[in-house]
Structure formats: structure tokens, C-alpha cells
Image (cartoon, grey):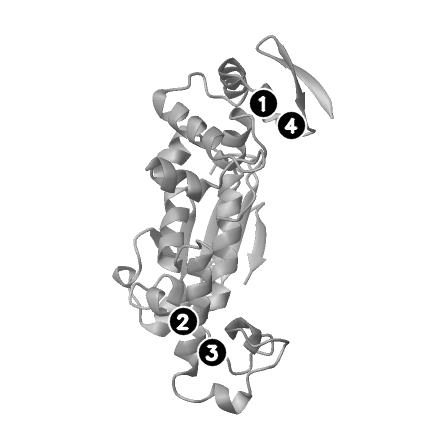
Amino acid sequence: MTDNNRHIAFICSKGNLDMAYPALVMGWAALGNGIDVTIFFTFWGMDMINKDRVDHLEIPPVANASMKMNMMGVPGYIGIPQLAGILPGMTPFATKLMKDKMKGLGVPTVREYLQMLVDAGAKLYACKMSVDMFGLKQEDFIEGVEAVVTAGDFMDMTDGAQIIFI
Amino acid sequence: MTTKVLAGLTVQVNEEGFLTNSAEWTKEIAVEIAQQEGLAELTAAHWKVIDFCRQNASGGKSPTLRAITNGTGLSTKELFALFPKGPAKKVARIAGLGKPEGCV
């Protein structure tokens, strides 16, 4: 980290596919503009750096009021009935839909995005409490995760940084 | 809109120092802007990126970083090493283009 340089720290606490992207997109934009980036993964956000989980993040249509059927070409803003959302296959279906849309826009996968961020100088850290809770080890993580750190460590390493909680 | 003298030529720039008319750009201007950005020398690899951006600019805007890595075959690491600390803006400024539109 360079002294006096703008520094943004993201806390990723969600493991759903849609919530994986905000930190990746903003982190990449920050790096492109010369801003230091630190990303701290905690709770469900651990899935983003878990090498067995990162390619299988999903978006469930249940309890997602903003997901309307116009994504599937149905005109207007007709919702997906919540009871339909619980049917087997609905979550994989919604996930595939989102992944296809992202791919169509040239948006990299979560795994690829994280690699880009690491290559561009972002520092990734895993939350100690979550690691203990989920029984994870450093070798469970994708390459580029620097260390498992405590909340206190995170506070020290983000002194003066702008913090975004996702 | 203001003007600035770069490499002996008067060019139009915006408040952030980006050329607003990419047609006013010359290689000499690129060298001078690069020096102001802390790049003492532009190597063949730098020029590969700059030329790619000039050729693939859309509406006077520089391509996104991902478009640059995909298009030039350079890795993300290499691109950030060539143009450290903010390649998105740095490349655009040196290439006489606007900041990239697009998030990737």
C-alpha cells in the first residue's frame, strides 16, 4: 500500500451470485483509477473465495421482490410467484439466466474477476471467525487470499480507508 | 474547456487533463503526457497498448481495461505493471482519448 493513496476496503458478507458482483465491479474500477483495494470476506461471503464454491454461487428467486419475469422476456413487471420460486430447479434456472446475461455483457465470472483483482494488486483476506465457524483452511481458498485475519487486524489494515459493507 | 501546450502544440483539454479532440494527438504528445504521469520511457509494450486504444476507441473514449487485455494479449499483471497506479485513466490520457465507458 502506498502512503497517502486513496484506499477502499470492501467487506463481502453475502454468498449469493448477485451480491458477489458489487465489490468486484467497484474494486476493479478503483484499481483502474489507481486506488488501493482491500477485500475482507466474512460469513456467506466466504463462498466467493472458497475454491469449491466460487463457481457455484446462485441467485434464488424466493423473497427477491425485484426479480421480475421481464428478465425472461415477459413484458411488464410481472413477479415470479413465490410458490413457483420454491419449485426444484427454479434457483438453478434463475442462476443460469443471470450468468447468461452477464456473459452476454462480457462480464467475467466471479473466479476470473477475483483473479483480475489480485493481479491488479487487490489484497484479499478471510475472516478468522468465519473460517473457524465453517471449518475452513487456507488451502480451501482460491489463490490470492493472503491470510486469515481477525476483525481487529482488519481495523488496523484499513486505517484511513473508506469502507464499503456488502 | 481549456487549452494546453504539449510537445509544442496547443491542444484542447478538459478539467482532468484529457485531450478532448483525439485528432489533435501525436506520438510526441503521448511521450510528454507519459512523462508527466511518471513514465520516463514508452517501451514497445506501452506502444502496443496505446496503439490498440487508438485503433479501438469508440466515440473518442478509450477501451476498458478488460478490452485492452483481451485485445492485446497482455495479462492484467503486465498492464498494471506497464501503467502503474490507475491504468484506466493513465492509458486514456496518454493515448489522447476520454476515460473508458463501461465497468469492466
Q: Amino acid at mark 1?
A: Ala
Q: Amino acid at mark 4?
A: Thr
Q: Are marks 1 and 3 in contact (CB under 8 Å)?
A: no
Q: Which residue carries the number 1 mark?
A: B23
Q: Is residue A9 left or right of residue A123?
A: right
Q: Amino acid at mark 2?
A: Lys
Q: Are marks 1 and 2 in contact (CB under 8 Å)?
A: no
Separation (CA) of disc 1 from disc 2: 44 Å
| Chain on which label 2 sits | A
Residue A67 can be seen, yes or no? no
Q: Which residue carries the number 2 mark?
A: A96
Check disc 4 and report its element: helix, strand or loop. Answer: loop
Q: Which residue carries the number 3 mark?
A: A60
Q: Position of residue A4 (x, y in %)?
A: 57, 35
Q: Please name which of the two marks, 2 or 3, marks the residue nearer to the observer.
A: 2
Q: Position of residue A25 (x, y in %)?
A: 50, 53
Q: Nearer the viewer, residue A107 or A8?
A: A107
* For residue B42, above or below residue A142: above
Q: Which residue carries the number 4 mark?
A: B20
